[in-house]
Amino acid sequence: MTKPSQAPFTVSQETIAHMLDQIPTDNPLGLRDRAMLELLYASGLRAAELLSIDLPDISPWQPFLAITGKGGRRRTVFFGRTAATWLQRYLAEARSSLIAGDDPALFLNSRGGRLTTRSLQNIVKKHSLITWLTPHTLRHCFATHLMENGASLRHIQVLLGHATIATTEVYLHPSTEQIKRQYLKAHPLCQPYQPTLNVKEALNAPNLCRLPSRTAHRGRQP
């Protein structure tokens, strides 16, 4: 019997936003890192796909690009205004100071050459407080957050470049964040705390935890 696939490890949208916001952008490498990780999370690209982008392939004024993925499959990926803004800043303020030759790569290392997958892994690790976060985790987060916000499985399959929808079905597993939200929404003892209520009002409030009566415990042995 085939073992069912487990949901991929992901982090919350807030965690991703915090990671991106704390990247220092007062130097060329910091601007490059911010633009690169913004694009990675916004588009769901694989690490190799991101690093294969050449300068003529992309325009930050057009929020999409054509990419060739696994198996030579061509697809269009999209990115939003935030990623576009950081790409514009990187191109205007940082890339020219990293150029050391004629490498056409969009994202350059400190020596002016194309970044490697290992370098990208180290950059993600450098800016993350979570030791197991990788470039592929950001791809998982891209798909999971789309699913959480109502995107269809078919559309996610196309955006990720999966050959079959069976590969994408792993994202049907509810994420920890989804489970937490449903728990907080549905459990009767997890309603918002109301500190202005006194004890008498609390006992009569239908959505708050009721205190056990003293009589209910009389006669019981500890």
Image (tube, rainbow, N blue to C red):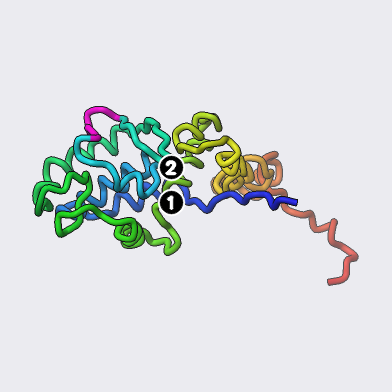
Q: Is residue 62 magenta?
A: yes
Q: Position of residue 133 (x, y in %)?
A: 43, 58
Residue 207: x, y in percent? 67, 40
Q: Main secondary structure of the magenta part?
A: loop
User: Which residue is located at x 55 percent, y 47 percent?
Assistant: 177
**In the image, is 102 to the left or to the right of 159?**
left
The image quarter in which residue 170 lies:
top right
Q: Residue at x 29, y 56 (%)?
A: 116
Secondary element type, mark 2: helix
Q: Is residue 19 above or below residue 71?
A: below
Q: Tell me the SS state at disc 1.
A: helix
Q: Which residue is mark 1?
A: 136
Residue 163: x percent and y percent? 52, 37
**Which residue occupies the foreground of this view, 93 or 192?**
93
User: Disc 1 marks which amino acid?
Assistant: His
Residue 64 figure quarter: top left
- Residue furthest to the front in view is 72
Q: CA distance from mark 2 to mark 1?
A: 14 Å
Region in magenta: 57-63
Asked whether residue 191 appears in the rendered view, the answer is no
Q: How many marks?
A: 2
* Residue at the disc numbered 2: 70
Q: Residue at x 59, y 47 (%)?
A: 180
Q: Which label lies toward us, 2 or 1?
A: 2
Viewer can see residue 77: yes
**In the rendered structure, does residue 218 fall within the stretch colored magenta?**
no
Pick the residue in front: 121 or 49: 49
The quarter of the image holding the C terminus is bottom right
